[in-house]
Every structure is written in C-alpha cells, then in structure tokens.
Amino acid sequence: MNPRSLLAKFDTVASFFQSPLLLVIRLYWGISFAQTGWGKLTHLDRTAGYFESLHIPLPKLNAIMAGSTECLGGALLALGLFARPASLPLIGTMAVAYWTADREAVMAITSDPEKFVTATPFLFLLASLLVLVFGPGKLSLDALFFRKTASGK
C-alpha cells in the first residue's frame, strides 16, 4: 500500500476524534471555570481579601470581574456557544492569575518548566487556548446554530 494513502487513511481516522476531544475539553474545563467563578462570586469578601493580599488594585471590583468572566465564559465554553470569543477573556484572566498569584512559576518558565506547568492556571489557560485555536468542534452549539449551508451562506 502506498505510504501517502496509508497516511491519508490514518489522518481520516484520527480526525474523527477531534470533535469528541474538544467536547470533553470544553465540558470539563468550562464547568471547572464556571464553578471557580461562581465560588469567587459567592465568597466575594474572601476573594477580595485574597486579591488584596496579592496587591491587586480595586480588589472587590476585580474579584467581581474575574468571577463573572470565569462563570459566564466557562458556561459558554462548556456549551460551545461563542466559544472562541469567550476563550479570549478567559485567557486574559488566566494570564493575570499567573502574573499575580503564580509569578514565581512564570519567572521559572525556562529554569524550572515543571513549576510553570504545574501551576493552577496552566490547564485552564491551555484549555482556553485550544478552543481559541481549534474552535469548539462539531459537537457544539456554535456548530449547530452557525453551521454554514451547502451554498456557503
């Protein structure tokens, strides 16, 4: 058998798993984001106190913004609804989380990469980046509602 046709068949089989994998990533991390955001909002004084200990300006306002972003963005990510746009503020929130709460991990990215990848924001950030780059997949509300017709309209 020709190596090109073998590779093409392998690619076809492997591509079949793209949307189910994206669904699992979206569901797990979207729900995790939503729960984390809900926790911030329902324990606002505790969250604001933690933000204040990190020297984040306007800690209560930032706690509300971070919690709302995680809660709403996570729900949209899980549903696969406006998933790519929703991933952007989640990426921003995780970048701020890295810089404020895990700065040591960021500074050690080249000298101790394990510290960077084991920091709490890493997998949240990775999941958001995956959805931004690859989209939510065919098993999403975006695919259902915004599917292109055969005529391309």
Image: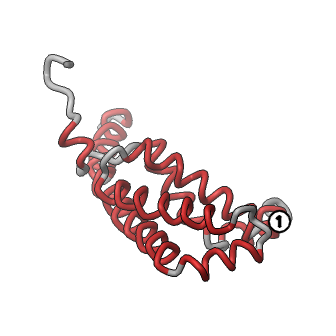
Q: How far across and down, in percent of the image, does residue 125 sit?
A: 57, 58
Q: The C terminus lies in which quarter of the figure?
A: top left
Which residue is pictured at 27% across the width and 43% down the height? 142
Q: The N terminus lies in which quarter of the figure?
A: top left
- The image shows residue 14, relative to residue 9, as above or below, that is below
For label 1, the crowd category at 10 Å Cα-Cα, with few meaning under 14, some 14 to 19 and many 20 or more, is few
Q: How far across and down, in percent of the image, does residue 23 sit?
A: 31, 58
Which residue is pictured at 79% across the width and 66% down the height? 103
How is the protein colored in the picture? secondary structure
Which residue is pictured at 33% across the width and 60% down the height? 78
Report helix, strand or loop for mark 1.
Answer: loop
Name which quarter of the figure residue 85 lies in: top left
Q: Determine which residue is flagged by label 1.
A: 108
Q: How far across and down, in percent of the image, does residue 57 sit?
A: 75, 62
- The image shows residue 69, relative to residue 49, as above or below, that is above
Q: Residue furthest left?
A: 150
Left or right of residue 144: residue 60:
right
Q: How far across and down, in percent of the image, does residue 140 sit?
A: 25, 50
